[in-house]
């Protein structure tokens, strides 16, 4: 049972070919839920059900279908495909074309009119990660000299095909002058000029602005739409909040994959093949495995010291794990703060000062606990307990400082900070914790 519909009942209706009853249920369903339902069907059933939908609903559902858009395009007649494309918003059509094989792209373009084709080609020329690639050219623009009454007439005439009508843009010779909301229009008299009620302090971005920066602007300023302009302030398109949310989700997924030492992919999990998944995971695993050999080298170097005091070996896994976890905590916190724009490289001194104080408190707490644990539970003498406790203290302080500085350094050098997350930092800290351990043991135990 899904939140808003009974999946089993719908599948039963398809199997029993009770299409009239199915259509009635579909008419009351949300487009996202219909797309989810279609994903559960095989291709033949999916095409049958898709053809039951009214063309405006079909276009909405089509935009939400991730896995089967290609199959549907192949199955639909030119007339049906044209109807779907006519109803799709421009940015959705562009997203569709970007991910399609060449033969399907040519078919899509063949079924769009000349002006739509030129808009699609214009949008496709913008870099993949830019504001230009995100924007839609379907927005409402008003003239500053028009009255509220004339503006409402224009909104009624053109608004149905626009991505949003809540925010209207005021332009003259395509230059962006201001913005006015429908709420402001409703609150004004019919005779009022648009230039008298428009907001002139308009936030906008250029076509080549990075889309991650654009998404952060939506979050920072609570926007529902953002105009995209060229270098001469001419309005080219708008980005709406739903597209900004998609970018936020993509960026978060990419960061999570990098933090887990996986090369990012933009495909859903089940659409990524086994070999492709292997290719994304294996480079980091090889790199981390080779870098982890440093740990083995250090252990080999202190082999005689370990043989002289075998008790020291018992605590190596705990020391390495604690160091890795400490570094991981700091790195994830800083990476997240940087992605939200809370922390910049210029804040490095403040970050280090804060993490230093936190690490000392954590280190002293764990040092006291581990000293008692080695004495009471492991039944070792006070000198061994002191070695382990001091190692924990120094390891945590070092790990947290490395964990907070490496992501900031990576960003400064032009790398993605997420690369410096837990797996990489853990490998570095493991080696350092062993060096600290044996340095302290050599001094105190005289190995």
Image: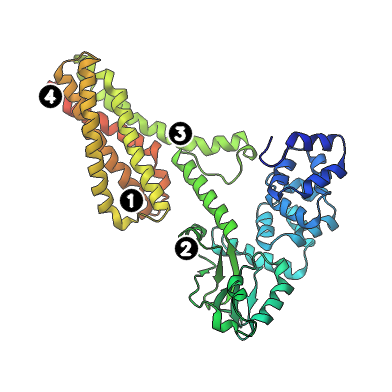
Dot 1 falls on a residue whose secondary structure is helix
At x 54%, y 73%, the residue is 230
Quadrant in the rendering for residue 267: top right
Please tell me which residue lies in front, 162 or 381.
162
Percent position (x, y) of residue 70? Answer: 74, 48
On the question of residue 304 being in view, the answer is no
| 339, above or below 331, in the image | below
According to the image, label 1 marks what residue?
409
According to the image, label 4 marks what residue?
444
In three-dimensional space, the C-alpha distance between marks 4 and 1, rounded to whole angstroms, equals 35 Å
Q: Nearer the viewer, mark 3 or mark 1?
A: 1
According to the image, label 3 marks what residue?
285
Of the residues under marks 2 and 4, which one precedes in the sequence? 2
Q: Spot the residue most to the top.
A: 379
In three-dimensional space, the C-alpha distance between marks 2 and 1, rounded to whole angstroms, equals 28 Å
The quadrant of the picture occupied by the N terminus is top right
In three-dimensional space, the C-alpha distance between marks 3 and 2, rounded to whole angstroms, equals 40 Å
Of the residues under marks 3 and 2, which one precedes in the sequence? 2
């Amino acid at each position: 049972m899904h939140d808003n519909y009974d999946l089993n009942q719908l599948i039963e209706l398809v199997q029993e070919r009770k299409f009239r009853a199915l259509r009635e249920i579909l008419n009351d369903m949300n487009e996202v839920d219909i797309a989810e339902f279609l994903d559960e069907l095989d291709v033949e059933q999916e095409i049958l059900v898709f053809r039951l939908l009214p063309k405006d609903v079909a276009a909405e559902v089509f935009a939400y279908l991730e896995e089967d858009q290609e199959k549907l395009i192949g199955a639909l007649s030119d007339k049906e495909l044209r109807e779907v494309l006519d109803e799709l918003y421009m940015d959705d059509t562009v997203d569709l074309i970007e991910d399609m094989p060449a033969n399907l792209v040519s078919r899509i373009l063949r079924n769009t009119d000349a002006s739509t084709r030129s808009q699609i080609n214009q949008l496709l020329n913008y870099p993949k990660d830019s504001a230009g690639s995100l924007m839609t050219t379907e927005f409402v623009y008003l003239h500053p000299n028009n009255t509220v009454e004339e503006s409402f007439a224009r909104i009624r005439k053109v608004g149905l095909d626009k991505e949003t009508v809540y925010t209207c843009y005021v332009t003259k010779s395509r230059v962006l002058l201001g913005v006015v909301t429908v709420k402001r229009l409703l609150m004004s008299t019919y005779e009022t000029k648009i230039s008298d009620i428009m907001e002139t302090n308009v936030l906008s971005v250029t076509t080549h602005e990075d889309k991650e920066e654009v998404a952060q602007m939506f979050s920072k300023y609570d926007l529902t739409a953002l105009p995209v302009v060229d270098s001469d302030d001419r309005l080219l398109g708008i980005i709406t909040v739903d597209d900004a949310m998609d970018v936020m989700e993509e960026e978060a997924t990419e960061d999570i994959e990098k933090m887990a030492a996986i090369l990012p992919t933009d495909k859903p999990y089940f659409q990524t093949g086994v070999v492709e998944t292997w290719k994304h995971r294996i480079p980091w695993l090889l790199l981390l495995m080779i870098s982890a050999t440093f740990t083995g080298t250090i252990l080999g170097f202190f082999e005689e010291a370990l043989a002289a005091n075998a008790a020291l070996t018992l605590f190596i896994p705990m020391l390495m794990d604690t160091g890795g976890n400490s570094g991981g905590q700091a790195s994830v916190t800083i990476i997240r703060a940087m992605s939200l724009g809370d922390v910049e490289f210029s804040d490095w001194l403040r970050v280090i000062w804060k993490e230093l104080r936190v690490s000392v408190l954590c280190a002293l707490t764990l040092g006291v606990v581990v000293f008692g644990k080695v004495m009471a539970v492991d039944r070792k003498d006070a000198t061994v307990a002191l070695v382990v406790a001091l190692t924990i203290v120094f390891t945590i302080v070092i790990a947290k400082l490395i964990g907070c500085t490496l992501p900031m350094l990576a960003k400064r050098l032009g790398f993605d900070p997420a690369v410096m997350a837990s797996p990489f930092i853990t490998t570095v800290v493991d080696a350092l914790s062993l060096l600290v351990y044996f340095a302290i043991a050599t001094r105190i135990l005289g190995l």
